[in-house]
Amino acid sequence: QGASLVWCEERPPLGAPSGASKGAFRFCVCSRALEVGEQSVRLGAVTIVLHNSPEYQLLASPRHIFLVPAASDFATVSKFLLVWHAEEARLTVTAPSAGFVLSKVMRSSSESDFRKLLLGFVGLLSTLAPLDIHTSALSNHGGLLLVSTQGTVNVVEPDGTQRHVFDLEGGPLAQGDDVQLKTFGNVLACVSAGVLYLIDQNSGRLIEKKILNMKTVHFLESPGEEDNIQLLTPTGIYSVSFSVPEDSSRPEPCLVEMVFEEACRYYQRRSLSSSKLTVEKLKKGGTFQAPVALAAILQHSLRQKEKPGQGLQDTYAKLLNTMSQELQSYLSLELLKTCVVGAPETEVESYCEELVEQEISRVLHSDIDKDNLAYLNSVFTSFPKAAWKATRGCLQLQQNGDGHLVARATPEVWKKVVGGPQQDEVGLNGVVPLFELICTSLLRFKPKWLPSFVELTQEYVSISWAYSSKEGPEGRVPLYKRALGVLARKSKRSEADDELELELLLCSKRPKAVLQAVRLLIQLKRWQRVVEVAEKFSKVSPLLNKEIFTTLLAEFAQHRELDPYLDRLWPLCPAELTASDILTVILQHLPASQEEAVPFSSEGGQLTVGLLKPLLQRVVQRPSVQDEVYGDALQSPTFPPPTPRREH
């Protein structure tokens, strides 16, 4: 492996008799540097990689070594594989039945004890299934190819992840059945039971299957000839040539298949016939031209980079011009995904942010159904910070010079934000509507913007839908209540969350929400803010003015906390309230006295006529409604005066 020799050897304990029975942990994995000079080869000192271990078969890729249990005599340790990263002196434990288990840096010889390594995940051992390995081999990409006794071909990556590649035909494999594996570029060649399988490693698609005349073959190395396989057989050496489909590593075939599969679902939903529509019928029938045209355009566009000389039918040229921007977006997205897969860890985050931005923008410009909404939920959950940045960019949320939040999103994007599947439509599977997703991001990264965002959304709704229209979002659950629902799901509550709840109630400008905010402020004894809210919202409507004033008048009757603000409170008195109405409210809310009342109490907490006198004087001196009706007539010089207006 590289410039080192690595091997597994048996090391019986010192003083043990030669005929003693072999135990489970009698082996040791060793490493020795190999220095090649001009005329000699020098061996370095022996380094212990792992001691007190079972017997392992070693398979070395250019940068990693896979340790596969050589025998299944000991069921406890035959449940996982080991991967040795020599450059980092790190050992990774992976189990095909569970994936990545553990990764540990071996800094000293005491840490390289296999039995101590087991203690790190001893609780998982009972849950792991035994290894099912019939054949193992290395791929040219550095992964470990495993064939199970059921004929399933999987690849284990050096980081411990596992991916399914292909299922061989012919049923279960016996212990003596010979299976040969070798990779040629992106093609996996496999010989089993006299059949040669050529499989695309990336997609798992069967490229070709050839039946051989002999069952015992061996692959020979053929450097530089990835499309030519050499087989060593008892009768000679044979060469097998095959043609890899054009751009097999690119996504065109899968993408074209997806086009036809989606077209099948689309036409099947709209078909009145009971017969099932298949991809083959779509390709051969000629009735539905849309998927055929789209598949031809995709194949043409995605091959232009490789073979720019190929042309397209004139019939599809106009459609290609219309789709050019979407195709360019798709190509850049595929390129970005490739960069994410091959990027170093330091650059993965920036690539992921760009990828999330493109994905969210793509979904927001398409129809948001249940599947797209579930996909958005997974993106927001997996990449919360990147999703917030992408959402902020799509909606163009920013503060103007006055500090107010503004958004320059198009009406189509706003409609996706407040429309789409609602909570009663998506069910209780953890998926939430897009509006709630954005509110959750705001609550996490920009909580002060949440009330302003709800207000902006309400402004758009009021323009696009009639008030309380059942088709619009406000006809279901009001937006401020949906935002409050997001706030209520927060695990830990703070004073800032209480302030946020108040702002959400007030930004809705709904009478019930404003009254709820006033009562909440009264509970918190924030009297200065109570009066400010009353002054602001009493101008909205006479009915809300009366409700707010009556609520504050009831508080005034019970305690003296509002006394410093009476000069600002009395001007809010509605015109229709009379002195009798005011006294009725006062008497209804007077606190019950615990002791016998005295005329001149030493305590200053009682309500006096002196405190109420300015309000009563204001009401009594205010012109009555009848005076306003006859005011013009009494001052008019004409005789007789005009007939008064009739009132029901």
Image (cartoon, rainbow, N blue to C red):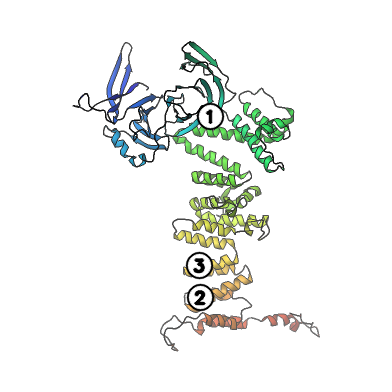
Percent across and percent down for residue 553 are 54, 76
Quadrant of the rendered structure where residue 305 is?
A: top right
Q: Which residue is mark 3?
A: 520
Q: Which residue is mark 1?
A: 204
Amino acid type, residue under disc 2 in the picture: Glu
SS for tag 1?
Answer: loop
Judged by depth in the image, the label closer to the viewer, 1 or 3, is 1
**Left or right, 80 with reference to 247:** left
Percent across and percent down for residue 88 are 35, 31
Percent across and percent down for residue 366 are 63, 43
Disc 2 crowd rating (10 Å Cα; few below 14, some 14-19, many 20+) is some
Label disc, if present, on residue 555 of the rendered structure? 2
Quadrant placement of the N terminus: top left
Question: Which is nearer the N-term, disc 1 or disc 2?
Answer: 1
**Foreground pick, 628 / 504:** 504
SS for tag 2?
Answer: helix
